[in-house]
Image (tube, rainbow, N blue to C red):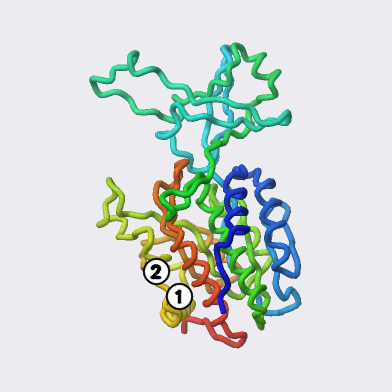
Amino acid sequence: MIKTILDEKSLNFLERYINTPSPTGAESKGQKLWMDYVSPFVDEIRTDNYGTAYGIINPEAKYKVVIEAHADEISWFVNYITEDGLLYVIRNGGSDHMIAPSKKVHIHTKKGILDGVFGWPAIHTRNYTGNEEPPKVETLWVDCGATSKKEVEELGIHVGCIITYPDEFFILNSNYFVGRALDNRVGGFMIAQVAKLIKENNDKLDFGLYITNAVQEEVGLRGAEMITQTIKPNVAIVTDVTHDTTTPMINKMKHGEIKCGNGPVISYAPAVQNNLRELIIESAEKNNIPFQRHASSRVTGTDTDAFAYSNGGIPSALISLPLRYMHTTVEMVHKKDVENTILMMYHSLKSIKINQNFKYL
């Protein structure tokens, strides 16, 4: 029997986890929170040199299955400090320059977190009746209230300090989880919930399960690239987010049709191993889990690619969660999709047999 997936304790963890800054390359606070949550459900917790964390069920088993998400969120680096005390920035991951003007930010220093704002000229001073220039990365600046470079440095701010948004998690209309960095800390939450279900239901797996929360996805799948060489899994099921394409200004002919609330998304792509994908589909159909399909032309753009092409080729598949407004501070996912993605991973794992042959030919 499946126990409640999204109980009060789990949702409390989700809120704290989403609100904890974990910028690419500095994910430690979020990872510690995640490890504390997942540790009662696993036999071992390990980390690597760059901060990827993974819990293991049956660490003594020879056969290894990974379920994976990534923990890092997009952010900014301080790149240049003017003599007047303004901070210019560069991206740390795929930060969206269009949403930055007038946003409050947190500047991370050794002295603690400082407040700042992305400044922008008032509408009265701009040529808003003509073809005005949109914001660009090189024209964005952060104002921390200092009036000189010396004052900035005395605050503990220097080139290389990371800047994040402070926007926090909330629930919209009882159905949507909203917040920054749902891409993809909601994935870390979902794989933890799979481990929780296995523990609560006393499921016995005949393989080692590696619940893996990887770092540095936003800068090129680097955490997954490293950890797949460490674990050397036999099978990998990756979860990430994908675009809800039913909101305005998205071309369905180009991006396909995916909608929040219609179920998790199963990907078709060269990196997705066909037999493993079909096992997931069959498991979903058997357990009446709704799902959608998505095709990727060359790459999935997720950690699936890193796992699939490692160690001579690892049978890998991707289960995605529909999400609105990716790489903004109001990313949205549907509660039902979160529940069904957890169930899809859980039942897929229970369908994997130790002697199963996932070879394509």
Query: How crowded is the residue under tag 2: few (<14 C-alpha within 10 Å), some, or many (20+)?
Result: some
Q: Is residue 121 visible?
A: yes
Seen from the viewer's position, the closer of residues 203 and 85 is 203
Quarter of the image for residue 258 reads bottom left
Q: Is residue 328 above or below residue 113?
A: below
Q: Secondary structure at mark 2?
A: strand
First in residue order: circle 1 vs circle 2: 2
Across and down, in percent, residue 245 comes to 32, 54
Tell me how many marks there are: 2
- For disc 1, the marked residue is 277
Across and down, in percent, residue 75 comes to 55, 39
Q: Residue furthest bottom?
A: 355
Query: How crowded is the residue under tag 1: few (<14 C-alpha within 10 Å), some, or many (20+)?
Result: many
Across and down, in percent, residue 326 comes to 43, 47
Q: Is residue 150 above or below residue 135?
A: above
Q: Secondary structure at mark 1?
A: helix
Seen from the viewer's position, the closer of residues 117 and 53 is 117
Q: Is residue 225 visible?
A: no
Across and down, in percent, residue 201 comes to 63, 77
Amino acid identity at mark 2: Tyr
Mark pair 1, 2: CA separation: 8 Å
- For disc 2, the marked residue is 268
Amino acid identity at mark 1: Arg
Give the residue at x 52% y 81%: 358
Tell me if 169 is positioned left or right of 203 in this view: left
Give the residue at x 62% y 48%: 16
**Are the residues tagged 1 and 2 within 8 Å (C-beta)?**
yes
